[in-house]
Image: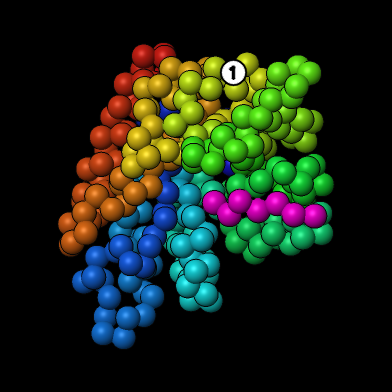
Amino acid sequence: MTREELFENIKKKQSFLCVGLDTDVNKIPEYLFDKEGDLDPIFEFNKQIIDATADLCVAYKPNLAFYESLGLQGWDVLERTVEYIRQNYPDQFIIADAKRGDIGNTSAMYARTFFGNMDFDSVTVAPYMGEDSVSPFMSYEGKWVTLLALTSNKGAFDFQFMKDEENGERLFEKVLKTSLKWGNADNMMYVVGATKAEMLSDIRAIIPDHFLLVPGVGAQGGSLAEVVKYGMNDNCGLLVNSSRAIIYAANDESFASAARTEAMKVQKEMAEHLKAKGLI
């Protein structure tokens, strides 16, 4: 999917919502399980969430840890989930929240996994090991790298805000500036946590045109209004992720309709922001 296609979908749906499929086997409604306790209920949960929200969002982001923890069956559910989205909602941008990044030949295998064997549009990648750990993901036409820049967790302060003693540049700013040499606004976006929304102005000064994947709105307490204020550009430039607040809005047979209600609240707010910015 191109940047232009993504923006057109945002305008069409009046939404820049990304729904995180962080499907925890211990949190989905019990009635979905049969007596044998197999994993079909996890796929059924994903399917119903997707069907309930697909017209309100432009992206889905399965968090791979929730599937890898279940072994081979979890991978099967993940593959079936991606296939279901592709077959039924082909306009969706699908992000593998995998946080990969290793020496070149290993990264090449990760890239083959998500782009060659599975039909993801993007994969989250950690930049710590440098360009050769990221470049294999850039070799697939039409695919994106979503690079970790400034995360929403408390531990972000351990390293990401460290300053260069000579010029005062923070580590996340160094990551942004260096990585600009690796890709461009058509194949690279960045993770910037909503709980660090006040930093978005500084980030936009370095990467004015790139899309930002923004987690932390919803259960983590990030403000959508603040994200828009500091992070939206002339092409929207935002994919704002919400996971738990949407997919676990209810824990009974109403879970899909409850998820839709929560997603619709976010979509309506996003539509107002897009209108205020003159983008729709």
Quadrant position of the C terminus in the picture: top left
Above/below status of 92 relative to 227:
below
Q: Residue at x 33, y 25 (%)?
A: 271
* Residue 131 picture location, percent across and down: 80, 42
Numbered range of the magenta stretch: 97-103
Residue bearing mark 1: 202
Within 10 Å of disc 1 (Cα), the crowding (few <14, some 14-19, many 20+) is few
Q: Give residue 42's position: percent from left, percent from top.
A: 36, 68
Residue 52 seen in render: no
Residue 143 or 149: which is nearer the viewer? 149
Left or right: where 166 falls relative to 117: right
Is residue 262 visible in the rendered structure shown here? Answer: yes
Instruction: Please tell me which residue is depicted at 30% across the width and 62% down the height of the picture.
Output: 27
Residue furthest front as drawn:
165
Q: Residue at x 34, y 38 (%)?
A: 218
- Residue at 48% over, 21% down: 198
Please state which amino acid type lies under the numbered disc 1. Answer: Asp
Q: Position of residue 237 (x, y in %)?
A: 53, 27
In the rendered image, which quarter contains the N terminus? top right
In-front residue for pair 93/8: 93
In screen coordinates, is 101 left or right of 150? right
Q: Seen in the image, is 159 located left or right of residue 257?
A: right
* Location of residue 25 (image quadrant): bottom left
**Position of 240 relative to 201 (above/below):** below
- x%, y% of residue 230? 48, 18
Q: Quadrant of residue 274?
A: top left
